[in-house]
Amino acid sequence: MRSISVIISCLFILFFITCSDEPVSPIDNQNGDPNGDTDGPNGDEPSIEYCCIVSFGGLLRDGSLTRAYDMVATSDGGYVITGQTNAYQGDFRGINTEGRAAVFLMKLDENLEVVWVRTIGGTWGENKPYAMSKTPDGGFVVSGHFGSNDGDFEGMLKGNHAVFIWKTDADGHTEWLKGYGGTDWEYGRSIATTSDGGYIIAGYSGSDNLDFRMLRLGRNYIFLMKLNSAGGLEWIKPFGIDTPNANNYGEFVTEAPDGGFLVTGTFTNGDAVIIKTNPDGVQEWIWKRERIDRYVGVNKIEILDNGRMLVAGQNILMEMTADGEILWEKPLGLDITDMTVLSDGSFTATGTARDNEELFREFNIYNRHMSVLHFDADGTLNWKNTIGGDHGDSGKSIVKASDGGYILAGRGSSDERVLEGFKKGTHDYLFVVKVDENGRLIEKD
């Protein structure tokens, strides 16, 4: 009997060693949780220290809020982020003043050190950027909405909120600031530089007068606004369901290869839409995705080298022809806010990973995390990771790092797990993180 027990014990040890030596799939997380916490939200904090995480905001318990909305890579290896803040202490001491709602541009170098911060703002109402673009002269242009009628926006507000377009030089210094609106509300959700040197803006409006006269469709309508290189208005076009209480929302715009435009948004019934126009903003075709049992929306379109479109958003990931025909689609339950396409046609994306989504169940998320995912050119998921704590964090923008890996900008609320010690201000803060080419956090030497 004793010899049989010894044999069984040996077999058990051999089985254990064999299993523990199996290779880890590149889609598997590290140590059960990508942030090094194997005990869940209430377990011990991770002992591993990571480099390449920085955060920006005010002081704890000062009532401040700081959020990132978009980011671009610069030719010198750095990064420029746009966002909003009401912080006047902490990282914004001497940059912003008490009671001022500011829109900022922040330049970071390749090591994520601050090079400069520029702001515009006023002391009343909400001032918020949504998107930015690099300009041919090396500067930047930002779109958003403003509710202030003093400070930098003095004399510009015509209603509750209006669209602003902020043009700067390469060092973030203001070259011009324009405001467009009616007597109700306008939101400039997306901006792109056009091939003629001008700008195209998409958003939504509730006005039918002043700059937006004779345009109303429903209660809110999607608008497409074309500006020249100096910010002068060329035309505005409305889109949407035209019923009295219809709420139509514009989300994103980019220039199509033929010089027309691709506009995304949602109609009042919750349907996601892509609208293709000619260069004058006249609709050529429309694609719709019906909302049935979950939210749907298109947050980003990338034009590929072959002229096709890579389309991503909330519960949408697909490739389309230039005429709007779907070539492939992946039924993934995810929320993508931004993505970057690599030279081999594959792409890496960021967004929000939620605790109730099956795709991220293995990461032991409590509330929300920033997500980072890599896909083959045909949409096959290669790997995934999440970054965050226990109080709601999300990814807003992603770019390829100048020396490999990726830079992600996000909205943080947590002060635990890998974000322990990074919280700034009372509410949300801006955090930026660098990950390696497999989406993994980089350990300190």
Image (cartoon, rainbow, N blue to C red):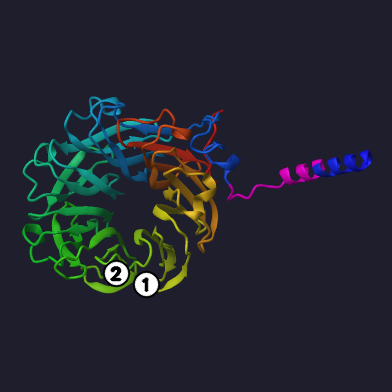
How far apart are labels 1 and 2 at the CA level?
9 Å
Image marks 1 and 2: residues in contact by CB distance under 8 Å: yes
- With 442 as the anchor, is 97 left or right in this view? left
- What type is the residue that disc 2 sits on? Lys
- Residue 102 seen in render: yes
- What type is the residue that disc 1 sits on? Gly
Callout 2 secondary element? strand
Region rendered in magenta: 13-28
Residue located 27% across and 44% down the image? 139
Residue that mark 2 sits on: 276
Residue 372 within the segment the image draws in magenta = no
Residue 243 or residue 410, whichever sits in front: 243
Is 323 located above or below residue 152 in the figure? below
Residue 204 placement: quadrant: bottom left
The disc, 1 or 2, on the residue closer to the chain's N-terminal end is 2
- With 56 as the anchor, is 161 left or right in this view? left
Residue located 72% across and 43% down the image? 20
The percent position of residue 203, horizontal first and vertical second, equals 22, 57
Circle on res. 301 = none
The percent position of residue 68, horizontal first and vertical second, equals 32, 42
Residue that mark 1 sits on: 324
Is 145 located above or below residue 90 in the figure? below
Residue 287 or residue 278, whichever sits in front: 287
Is 94 located above or below residue 135 in the figure? above
